[in-house]
Image (cartoon, rainbow, N blue to C red):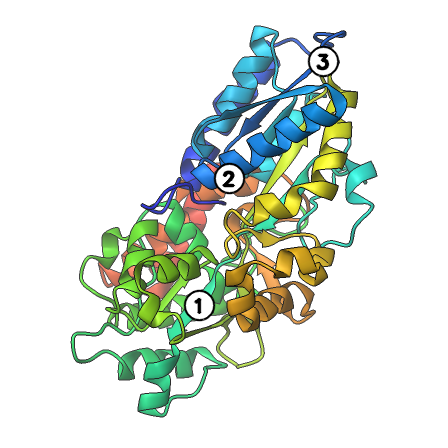
Amino acid sequence: MSNQNNNGGVSRRTILRTAGAAGAALAATGLSTPAVFGQSRKQIRFLNAETSIDSIRALKVAAAEYERQTGVEVVIDSVPLGDVFTKVTTSLRSGKPYDIATVAFVGHVLLLANEGHLVDMTPLTSKQEWGKNILFPMDGKTYWYPYDYNLAWIYYRKDLYEQNGLEVPKDQATFLANAQALTKDNMSGSIFPIASNGATNWLSPGFLWAEGVEIFDDQWNIIIDSEENAPKTKAYLDFFGDLYKTMPSGTSQASYSEMLTSFTSGSVAHSAYAGRLVETIERNSPDLADKFGIFPYMDSSGTGKAVNHGYDGWVVLNTGAAEESMKFMEWFTENQLINFLHTAPLHFQPARLDIYDDKRWKAHPLIEKHAGLVESMKGFLTDPDLTITSIDTQGPEPDLRPGKVFESFALSEMLQQKCLLGTSSDAALEMGAQKMRDAIA
């Protein structure tokens, strides 16, 4: 889930809300078998959702070089992430489809693949080794090319830990004690969002995943309140209720931007985010650049750990230019991908494991400067004992139902009931579980 601007970017809710309407729009195309458009054209239309100046420039430079080498024009159109899926489906209905597009929700990949609109990208993805839980295969085939993770972990003020004699926490009780100890002198101990927004869905469930809590069983039943999961979920709500007392006023409405600015302003000791927070520190608060560290979300026993999932990738649509589009993607991912990743060097965490050892990628100044952080980021992908999951990737296989639970904001409302209204964890869980069931009914 790449954020697209200095205010923290696009909520995944915006993306997910298009799924139902756009799914109906796909059905309305009547393309139960893939249509073929523009058989003779020498042009590829690429819909990009990374709208920073640097990312657009990198794509356009790559497009110009490909045209110079092959004579095939690659037209780059850029729109905000929340508009991408609607733009794709509109182009399909118009008979002038995009050939390549950015996607940031596995449900959209599923919708497009089920309607026959996507090309199997396994010939490209099979060439490389990937981090865990990123290819989302469907019937043994991969229908997208993931270019990055947007994993969420916890940032902490390393200098304050040293000054106060605190240890990096391995369990939730220690983390809570550290946050409480640092709530002083105009400093809040932590900030984690609880509002009904994408930031909460992305940045606050990590403690649940570390406990091993699951939302669905293999038959798509809601099991967050099952005999096995209920005690862990209620303990999470109890923990979060106490942690909320260490957070600044206004946290009840916090979204992406507050998670960035609170930490970079020096007003909170712990925050959660992906690599973009480091880039924000370097740009806005360089004095903090050597004063922070990161660690994963932890469970109550000190044995479980997790990071919350996030991801972005590209799909090739099954148009008359599909063969040429696959050629371009093969060339781009082999020759230009690193240049593109360098446009957000720490936020665009590579999904391909070979890139971490590529000297061209490692040569970026920020990657060199934060080599220890990068090693930790890679370690999250290779650690067999660490969980990488999210609300929208829960369940036995890619499906729209986790997305519906995501959009219901049931988890956010559980946290609001506990933190703002003082509702018992039993009652908050009961309400949240029922809302999840209603969402997928």
Question: On the image, numbered disc 1 is attached to which residue?
Answer: 154
Residue 334 image-quadrant placement? top right
The number of numbered discs placed on residues in the rendered structure image is 3
Quote the CA–CA distance across marks 2 and 1.
Answer: 26 Å
**Left or right of 273 in this view: 218:** right
Quote the CA–CA distance across marks 1 and 3.
Answer: 47 Å
In-front residue for pair 419/227: 419
Residue 165 visible in the picture: yes
In-front residue for pair 207/181: 181
- Specify the label residue 42 is tagged with: 3
Query: Which amino acid is tagged 1?
Result: Ile
Q: Are marks 2 and 1 in contact (CB under 8 Å)?
A: no
Query: Which amino acid is tagged 3?
Result: Lys
**Residue 25 placement (x, y as % from top left):** 54, 15
Mark 2 crowd level (few <14, some 14–19, many ≥20, 10 Å Cα): many
Query: Which amino acid is tagged 2?
Result: Ser
Mark 1 crowd level (few <14, some 14–19, many ≥20, 10 Å Cα): many
Residue at 23 percent across and 78 percent down: it is 183
Residue at 45 percent across and 59 percent down: it is 205
Residue at 51 percent across and 68 percent down: it is 369
Question: On the image, numbered disc 2 is attached to which residue?
Answer: 55
In-front residue for pair 438/30: 30
